[in-house]
Image (cartoon, helix red, strand yellow):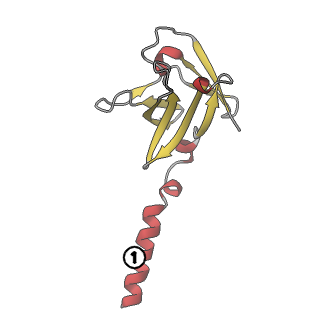
Amino acid sequence: MRSVFIAAFALALLTACSKKENSSPEEYLLYGKWAIGSHDGDTLQFLSNGGRNILRYLDARFITGIYMEREYKYGNGMLSIQMYPSEDFTQISSFTLRQQDSEFSVAANELYPLISSNATLIYNKIP
């Protein structure tokens, strides 16, 4: 009886810890660093933190180099970002993944809502 309990517990533990295997591979497609230039301020990082997908970037409004983090969702080729914790996710309609998942383009004012420029930014994945 004791071995059945231990086996059931081990199975439950393994199932709970294997979130990545149970999720769609597309969810992890953006993970890594992406850059449009050679400076830290030109770099985005997509990562997992506490079971959430996070977009991390250097906030140019602060001289001290404060990083901003926003939760994101990616699926069916669509990127959505939670701009503020109390709001729903906002779809980034200009986002386009290109060149075999190693480059994407996005409108500056959609990715950075406080910027008035509507220039198209092109990010390349850093190996």
Q: Secondary structure at mark 1?
A: helix
Residue 108 in picture, x, y percent from top left: 52, 16
Q: Nearer the viewer, residue 105 or 93?
A: 105
Q: Give the residue displayed 53% in from the left and 42% down from the top.
A: 47
Residue drawn at x 45%, y 35% is 72
> For residue 113, which quarter of the picture?
top left
Give the residue at mark 1: 9
* Outermost residue toward the bottom in this view: 1
From the top left corner, tell me how far across and down residue 98 is, in percent.
Answer: 65, 27
> What x and y, as percent, mark residue 94?
52, 19
Q: Quadrant of the C terminus?
A: top right
**Direction front: furthest residue:** 64
Quarter of the picture holding the N terminus:
bottom left
Give percent across and percent down for residue 22. 49, 56
Give residue 73's quadrant in the image.
top left
Q: Residue at x 40, y 86 (%)?
A: 4
Residue extending farthest left? 86
Amino acid under disc 1: Phe
Q: Callout 1: few (<14), some (14-19), or many (20+) C-alpha neighbours within 10 Å? A: few
Residue 33, above or below 112: below
Left-right relation of 16 to 40: left
Rendered position, 9 above or below 63: below
The mark tally for this picture is: 1
**Up-down relation of residue 12 to residue 25 (above or below):** below
Image point (50%, 37%), residue name:
75
Q: In this view of the protein, which residue sits in the foreground, 21 or 36?
A: 36
